[in-house]
Amino acid sequence: MFLARRLVLAHFWVAFVAFAAALVLGEWQMVARSPLHPWVSNPEVYYRSVTGHGTVMAYVLPTLVAMGFGYALTELSLKRPLLGVRWAWAGFWLVVIGTVMAATPVALGMASVLYTFYPPMIGNVFYYLGIVVVVAGSWIWVGLTSWNLHRWRQDNPGETVPLAMFGNVTGAYLWAWTSVGAASEVLLLILPAAFGWRDTIDAGLARVLFSWTLHAIVYFWLMPAYIAFYTIIPRAIGGRLYSDTMGRVAFVLFLVFSMPIGIHHLFADPQVGAGFKFLHAAFTAMVSVPTLLTVFTICASVEIAARLRGGTGAFGWVKALPWDNPYMLAVAFAFVMLGFGGAGGIINMSYQLNETIHNTQWITGHFHLIFAGAIVSMYFVIAYDLWPQLLRCAPLSPRLMRWQLWLWFLGMMITTIPWHFTGLLGMPRRMAYFDYSHPALQPQAITVVISSIGGLLLVVSGFLFLWILATARRAALAEPPPYTFSIPVHVQPVPAALNTFTLWVGLMVGLTVVNYGFPIVQLALLEGTSVPVLPVGGPR
């Protein structure tokens, strides 16, 4: 039996309701700076919306999905009740309380600093305290995930950790170390300024500390999606997982290479030397390896499903795929968006090419394709797959699921392709308005309108997703069939290194210290680097 239903449902509902609100904010931003809408009279309102949108999408949605899905994976993959349910509820309520604490000053215009904080701008102290409380709640999930695995190992000595749980623990450990950078920035630099204890802040050091978190957080976002790739998709489309071992390799490579790469976001910043910028660029390229392994493994798993359905030939098997299956559509759409977004990322991580698109709409298009496109599409899959278990309801409507996924895919492509194009032309991101009467900008007006139309499709898709979940038909006292994960084609012994985390966590910490230690210590010891605090939204 699935005993943690209410706990998982609580996480999902708060995540997805907040997600819907953030979607509306995102669409308003696109319309507000398009020629369809007059200039925003107060640009702070625009940045207030950007801050709310980014905070929900970067912190609240992925954290609650990872926690809720993680608790479900712990119970379903280990086949035993979740230990520490009261602590899990405490972590959930901390996230909810922190979200309200952070959202309130943002809504009041007292913390329009964007989710990346951007010191020396300093907003209301409750915004930062809210983020701290959200992270503290997530750390309870990290501790419970590790504790449940430890207890399972004690009761099952020598057994192989299920792939779903292995990925779940990987994501938890990755997040625990990822969040240290932003937590250090907030606790050591921002909060003293937000409380009024200091009138200056070392903005350069703050940006380096946030870069510790800034890129690695993307891989925390995608861990639930990659777990779904390996453990849900092959089973859901009637196939087998090509390789359990490949999944474990991909997970641990993310653990190792996600961390020491964030300074590639600071190529234009003068406070970091060129040598470390190049080092981070090189390590960023390594993150493509686990993604390429995953694409190969899942494509092979999909081919197995097609051949089991009678597909033949070098490419003829593609026609035999279950294209009417929403899960098949979801993985296809996710891989298309991951491919385009990843290709754009290669430009971003290049020390030289980045200069051509730095701080342009290209960046916005890139990370929306990766997160809002590929990753969020798999969040939909996770919810759809677990919903009958969580509600003891009848299977969800495949027709509505297909409509929802198609709308999301088309909306995301229509939104982001113009962003990439205008980014190449130099259109800056995070601008509240543009003067489209200017001859140089007038031809770009149509691209902003097109993106707004794509954003409208995304809003419709997002609310259709909520409708599908909310209208699921409950079956009276029905117990759903036992939940299963994908079965690998070949069940083989798992190498000891791919059944434990000591080596990989050690490498993660070690590479982070090597790649970040000197820049952080150097900046911390330099004198005269602080600048005056710039209060945002009135008194702190």
Image (cartoon, helix red, strand yellow):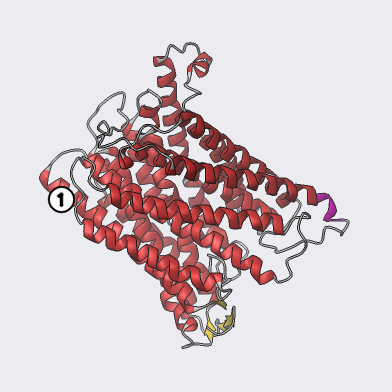
In the image, 441: left or right of 420?
A: right
The rendered magenta stretch, by its main secondary structure, is classed as: helix
Furthest-front residue in view? 476
**191 within the magenta span:** no
Q: Vertically, is 540 above or below 438? A: below
Residue under circle 1? Answer: 151
Q: Which residues are magenta?
A: 440-444
Q: Neighbour class for label 1 at 10 Å: few (<14), some, many (≥20)?
A: few
Residue 225 image offset from top left, x and y in percent: 42, 42
In this orientation, which residue lies closer to the viewer: 190 or 412? Answer: 412
Would you say residue 375 is visible in this rendering?
Answer: no
In the image, 299: left or right of 456?
A: left
Label 1, secondary structure: give it. Answer: helix
Q: Quadrant of residue 44?
A: bottom right
Residue 324 image offset from top left, x and y in percent: 50, 24
Would you say residue 146 is visible in this rendering?
Answer: yes
Residue at left 33%, top 39%?
A: 248
In the picture, the quarter occupied by the N terminus is: top left
In the image, 437: left or right of 356?
A: right
